[in-house]
Amino acid sequence: MWFRNLCVYQLADAFRIDAEQLEERLQTGAFQPVGGHDPESRGWVPPLPGGEPLVHVAGPRMMICLQTESRVLPPAVVRETVEERVSEREDAMGRPLGRREKARLKEEVTLDLLPRAFTRSKRCYAYIDLEARWLVVDATTWREGELLTDDLRALLGTLPIRPLQTDSAPGQVMTEWLARDHFPSDLEPGEEAVFEDPRSEGAEVRCKRQDLRSDEIRGLVRAGKRIRRLAVDWDGRINAVLDADLSIKRLKFTDLVQSDADEREAESAAERFDADFSIMSGELSRFLPRLQSWFD
């Protein structure tokens, strides 16, 4: 259950909800399997596998989980079936079909094939920290995170949040760190970065397994490149890739944190889940304010 990517939202101070109220609202949008003719179904499921509550509570933090079940209908299958039916229809009518007729036929084929299509499930986890006023979503992109926040807002009626905001542009600040070789005291660069050229849209340089402090890499900055993504090590406890849009990729908790989790004896999967959630959210409660301070 350890989060691997983060999209962090700031929660307005005026927003208040407890676990019981949240559970009641989520129950109205509980997950239902995708219907035979539906392409997709989304709903809330228990974060703890095999559990019952839709809200898993650990202190001031509440974890939730949105499940999406989609029918997988390969475009090639649809295309081949449509071509067959177009050919049959044209032979029967003695004339070629028009564009609108083909479009309607494609819709018919899709509806016919959907009940026989395989399904694919995906879960998106998040937790609300009422004390620190964060909503943290385990999502690779802000767009993916918004699927969860939009569904949550629809159930609650209101969800006053905004993506994490900072005073300075993160990409510019990270570039200056590297250019001056002056990083925050508790932060070390990793071995990976993505540079972009502000003068040429889409132009980028990707570095992996590189000493980012080397003259060769810093020469990219002198040539006018700017950092878009930077791998970092925070306090020996978290490794991650910081994005200029303030999303966090490939989050990994180091052995130092994992050893703390291993030291906690758990008699069941539920206890282990609860312990891991407490440790993870506790680490992030220290990391996220530091992240914000680096760019403020």
Image: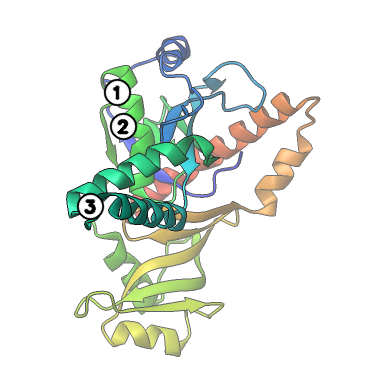
What kind of element bears circle 3?
loop
Q: Is mark 1 on a helix, strand or loop?
A: helix
Q: Any mark on residue 167, and which?
A: 3
Picture quadrant of residue 170: bottom left
On-image quarter of the N terminus: top right
Closer to us: mark 2 or mark 3?
Answer: 2
**Real-space Cα distance between discs 1 and 2?**
6 Å
What residue appears at the point 47 percent right and 29 percent down from the top-left corner?
A: 36
Disc 1 marks a residue whose amino acid type is Ala
Proximity of marks 1 and 2: CB atoms separated by less than 8 Å: yes
Q: Is residue 108 above or below residue 56?
A: below
Coordinates of residue 31 in the picture (x, y in percent) = 48, 23
Residue on which disc 1 sits: 154
- State the mark number for residue 6: none
Measured Cα–Cα span from mark 2 to mark 3 = 26 Å
Instruction: Answer few, some or many: residues within 10 Å of disc 3's Cα (few below 14, many 20 plus, some between 14 and 19).
Output: few
Q: Classify mark 1: residues with Cα within 10 Å, few (<14), some (14-19) or many (20+).
A: few
Q: In this view, does 126 lie to the left or right of 223?
A: right
Residue for point 19% across, 80% down: 199
Q: Which of 102 and 215 is in front in this view?
A: 102
Residue corresponding to mark 2: 150
In the rendered structure, which disc, 3 or 1, sits on the residue that comes first in sequence? Answer: 1
The kind of residue tagged 3 is: Asp
Residue at point 26%, 78% (across, down): 197
Task: Please tell me whether residue 235 is drawn above or below residue 24 in the rendered image.
Answer: below
Residue 77's spot in the image, x, y percent?
46, 54
Q: Earlier in the sequence, mark 2 or mark 3?
A: 2
Question: Disc 2 marks which amino acid?
Answer: Asp
Specify whether residue 137 is in view: no
126 or 93: nearer the viewer: 93
With 52 as the anchor, is 175 left or right in this view?
Answer: left
